[in-house]
Amino acid sequence: FSLYIDKLLISLEKSGLGCHVGNYFYGAAAYADDIILLSPTISGLQQMFNICHEYFNSHDIIISIYVYVLYVFKSDHNI
């Protein structure tokens, strides 16, 4: 499973989506069979979901769509 997920994480990083700090990508992480996606925008997160969906379909990986958590953090202040 980790061989498949490593390739997915690389694809997500190469997409340019997700969170970045300097030149470092923090948009996706995986542990065991869990994946976390981080994005500063909802549209970016949707695009990351789409990449995952396409990747899983093309590799015949079945995932549970009923086990997920979505957190939204909103700041009204510019940093």
Image: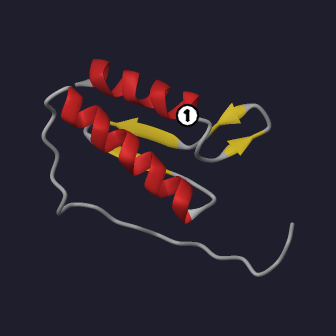
Query: How did the renderer colour the structure?
Result: secondary structure
Q: Secondary structure at mark 1?
A: loop
Q: Residue at x 46, y 69 (%)?
A: 71
Q: Residue at x 72, y 77 (%)?
A: 75
Q: Measuring from the top left, give residue 15's x and y in whole percent.
A: 55, 34
Left or right of 37? Residue 23 is: right
Q: Measuring from the top left, give residue 35's x and y in whole percent.
A: 36, 44
Q: Measuring from the top left, give residue 52's x and y in whole percent.
A: 34, 41
User: Which image quadrant: the N terminus?
Assistant: top left
Towards the viewer: 15 or 76? 15
The residue indicated by pointer 1 is 15
User: Which image quadrant: the C terminus?
Assistant: bottom right
Q: Residue at x 29, y 43 (%)?
A: 53
Towards the viewer: 37 or 42? 42
Towards the viewer: 51 or 34? 51
Furthest residue in direction bottom, as rendered: 76
